[in-house]
Every structure is written in C-alpha cells, then in structure tokens.
Amino acid sequence: MSKAYKKFVPSIYLYQGRAVHSLRDHTVVDDDPLRLAMSYNNGTADELLIFDQSRNDAEHDQAIDMIRSICENVRIPVTGAGHIRRLEDVKKLLYAGCRKAALNFSREDNVELAAEAAARFGRDKIAACCLATDAVLGNQELILKNVSRLYYVDGIDRTPWHKAPRVDGIETIAVLEEISDEDMAVLMNMNGIGGVGGNAVNDRISRILGIKKELEEKHIPVRMRKAAYPWSAFVKNSDGLLPVVVQDAATDQVLMVAYMNEEAYEHTILSGKMTYWSRSRKELWVKGDTSGHYQYVRSLTGDCDMDTLLARVDQVGAACHTGSHTCFFNEDLADTDPRSHNPGKVLERDYQTILDRRANPKEGSYTNYLFDKGLDKMLKKLGEENTEIIIAAKNPGSNEIIYEIADYLYHLMVVMADRNVSWDDIMEELARRQAH
C-alpha cells in the first residue's frame, strides 16, 4: 500500500450525463457531475470514485468526456469504474486522467481482462471492484497478482460492513450505502481496510473534517492538513494581522492581497479553502462563500521575515469583486522593450496567434495556408520538420537544431489548434504522469 492513512472516498454514480444516488437508485442528485466533484475537492476527501453506468457505447463516450473534465478540475486522485468490457475501456479511463481503473470482478470476463490490463498498464493502475463476496473469495490469487486495490461495493449479497471481504496484502475500500459514526470508526481500525467510500461518505462530506479529528484522537491514521509553522511563528502587523499575497498556482499570476488572523489561518489549513479576516466588516470570511469563487489552497509559504504569507491557490472564477480574474489590472508603468518576454509564456502566445489566424484569416499568412490545405498537409510538414531535427542533431553545433526544433514546435501547434488541443491539455497530462 502506498499510503498508511485511512481514506474517505466519496463516490459519483454517472447515469445519462447526471449524478444519481447509487448503482440501484437512479434518483438524480446533481445535474452537473463536475460541480458535485468540485464540492468533494475541498481538502476533506482523499480520493474520488466514479461509477459509469452507461447502457451503450455512445453514453460511455459521453461519460468518458465528463470523467476527463472531472480529472482535469480536481486535485484528488480519481478511480474510474463501470462499463469496462475490453482493454480499450481501461485505456480510455486512464487516458482521461484516472489514477486507477476498477474492473468489476463480478463479471468473469473482467477477471481475465485484469491480467491483460495489469500487463499493459501496470498493476498499480488496476483495481478490482466487487459487488458480491464470492467475487473476492473465488479470485484471491488473481486479485493479489493483478490489482493494487479492492473496492468492495455494498452489493447484491448485502454483506454486513464488518464482514467486508479482504485479501492479505491488498488495500480494501468499503463502498457502503450507510454506516453509523461508531461503526465507521471500528471499520477504519480494521486491518486491511484502507478506507470508506460511497454514500456513507457522500452524506457526511460536510462533517469529514470533524470525523477525521475524532479518528485521529483514537490513533487511527487519517490525512489532515498540517502546517509546518504555528500562528505564533509569524510576525503580525500592528493590528495583529498577517498580510497574504495570493497567487494563481496554474499561471503564477498574482490575484489579490488580503489579511488573516489566527482563526482565519487555522480555518484555511483545516478546510483547504482560503479564509481571511475582513478589516472593514470585522469578521471572518471564506473567499467564495457568497460568489462561489472559492480559492482552494495548494501551498502556503512564509517570507524571509515571516511577516507575509504567499498562498498559491486554485482559483474558481474571478478573484476580484469587479469580476476580473485578478485585482491587479491598473497598469501604471509598462515595459516597452519588445525583447522582454517570459520564456514560459512564448509557446502559449504563439499558440494564441495561431488560433487568431484560424478565426480571422490574414492574406498571405502561411498559417492560413496550412489551415486551407487541411490536416494531411499539416501532418506532412510536421513529418518533414521532424526529419530535419534528426539530421540537425547529427551535425556539430547547436544553432541548426535550435532552429529546426522551433520550426517543429510551430507546425506542432498548428496541428494542435486544428485538433483543438491546448498547451494546458498537454501540461495537465504531463503533470498527471509526474504525479504517478
């Protein structure tokens, strides 16, 4: 097991594009599964389990698009389950951003498929999802060999929670419809049980922090946000407040400046949502409680004098009350040197120029020439530029290969624009791979 702490894993049951109550009850819980996923991504849930209940391949493709959107927008690991019939379905879930694909071992063909999937993608990417005790007891050797986690779903045989089947050496997540707080504490303390999922967690999502505190007091390991520095380590201003500079973790853009008191600091750490002290209203405020534009904490860093805090956040919507993404938009002194540039932004600016050429054709533009000729011409040029890189790499010096790589990246971006793939999409995929 990669983590020793006990996990809380809310579950989303996708059915016809909506989030429904459970595998057996298709009462709609939320018309927008992404919105529901984001509500679980607030620093309390440890992972997310998504069941795709598609009835056909068309619905499955729609569900995959939703799962991809969820994976792109939440920071907690996601496991995808449901509608897995072949290796291609496993690949779709993993390529959509799921950390694991959970195969239903109540289907005999999926037991065999698990071995093939483990060989292709690695055992750590494969989980077993069982709705009946027999599916576990009859396949213990295959589970141990081919999967890295077992999800026991409170299913057709209605096994009591304390008899949830386990396999030595494999973490089991008990996906339950309901359980009392007292019984949950007992279950979480059982060997082999790595956590609880399903509606037993969904229905408690607003109380998870409190439950984690209680489990921690009982010496049951849970994941809690813990700061390296206590409030007393910071140097406050004359009002007893700490200035906070807030930065967008995705773009490094400075969003706003606010202030914290001790209560705001502690609430920020525990909740995962940026919380401040309003100097004008003389009250605590969670950024986003009124507007919905929450700031989810990625990191907090004190400066050299420990009198200012830098917060890197995932910003939902606009940070500024004016509707602007950032509060800093009144340019006072501009850098007019055309050679000044941020190297990290060059590719994005070039890509945006290519998109602009596609939307607003310009006479004589080579980019528009490529768009007019179509994808086959673009791919031909991309192949030619790739060959030029190989040739340049064999020659002495670096100038030639730098030039050819620049040409290649330009033609690559034209193809990306034609296929509606952005640099953000590429960076998200690279970040997921790095996390794995």
Image (cartoon, rainbow, N blue to C red):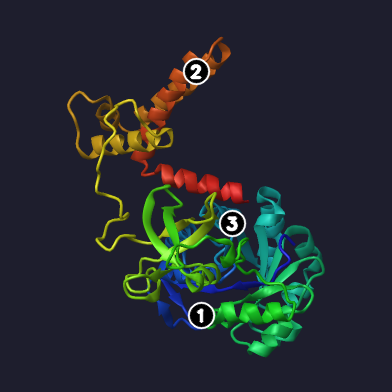
Q: Residue at x 69, y 77 (%)?
A: 216
Quick one: SS at disc 3? helix
- Residue to which mark 2 is pinned: 401
Q: Residue 206 has which mark?
A: 1
Q: Residue furthest top?
A: 396
Answer yes or no: is residue 55 visible: no
Name the amino acid type tagged 2: Ile
Q: Residues within 10 Å of mark 1 (few under 14, many from 20)?
A: some
- Placement of the N terminus among the 4 image quadrants: bottom right
Identify whether 315 is placed above or below 160. above
Mark 1, mark 2: which one is toward the viewer?
1
Identify the amino acid type marked 3: Val
Q: Residue at x 76, y 84 (%)?
A: 163
Q: Is residue 46 above or below residue 23?
A: above
Task: Select label 1 or label 3 by which is in front.
Answer: 1
Residue 367 numbered mark, or none:
none
Query: Residues under labels 1 and 3: Cα distance?
Result: 32 Å
Task: Identify the residue under disc 3.
Answer: 90
**Residue 145 location in percent, x, y?**
78, 59
